[in-house]
Image (cartoon, rainbow, N blue to C red):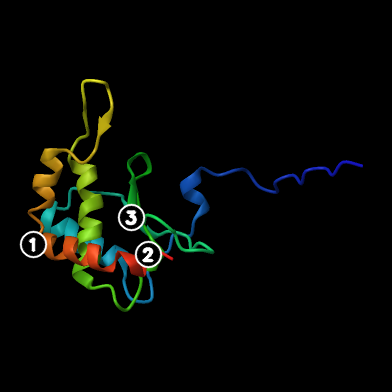
Amino acid sequence: MPRRKRKVACLSLPFQRQFAEDHEGEYFDLKAIFDKLNDKYFSRSLRRYRVIWGRRRRQRPKTYFVFASIQEEDRVIRVHPLLDAHFVPRWFMEYVLYHEMLHAVVPDEFDPNGRRLVHTERFKARERLFPAYRRARRWELENLGRFLR
């Protein structure tokens, strides 16, 4: 006899609402960092954004690691929970959030084939203005293995 599928007890919510809205980690408060960066580098222009920790996975990624992402339509910046660790420097966390915040203010461009480009020359030039940019990129390369299995 075929099994019947269980019915969902509540309405299906959009993807971003299925996660906890927690911005406080054990080592970092993402909202406090976001507010500081918004004030210092963006003249408080990024309004009504939520910055949250992503959900924990059972296994670490194997080949690549996404530190954070931004969902512009919903004004959500999601940071990988593995970054909430004692060995992650605060200036690196600030760089990660700064990078995502730049996506909100630097417009995407399109190549001749219509492909969307998000890390444009304009974006990269503005990203390099972050005081700890070179230090953060170096730390990222040196420590990437700590986030992969």
Mark-to-mark CA distance, 3 and 1: 19 Å
On residue 131, which mark appears? 1
Q: Residue at x 19, y 47 (%)?
A: 102
Say which label, 3 or 2, has the lower sequence index. Answer: 2
Q: Position of residue 99 (x, y in %)?
A: 21, 52
Q: Nearer the viewer, mark 1 or mark 2?
A: 1
Q: Secondary structure at mark 1?
A: loop
The quadrant in which residue 117 appears is top left
Say which label, 3 or 1, has the lower sequence index. Answer: 3
Of the 4 image quadrants, the one containing the N terminus is top right
Mark-to-mark CA distance, 3 and 2: 13 Å
On residue 23, which mark appears? 2
Left/right of residue 138 with respect to residue 30 in the rendered view: left
Of the 4 image quadrants, the one containing the C terminus is bottom left
Residue type, numbered disc 2:
His
Q: Residue at x 10, y 47 (%)?
A: 126
Residue type, numbered disc 3:
Ala
Image: 120 above or below 45 = above
Mark 3 closeness class: few <14, some 14–19, many ≥20 residues within 10 Å = many
Q: Which residue is mark 3?
A: 68
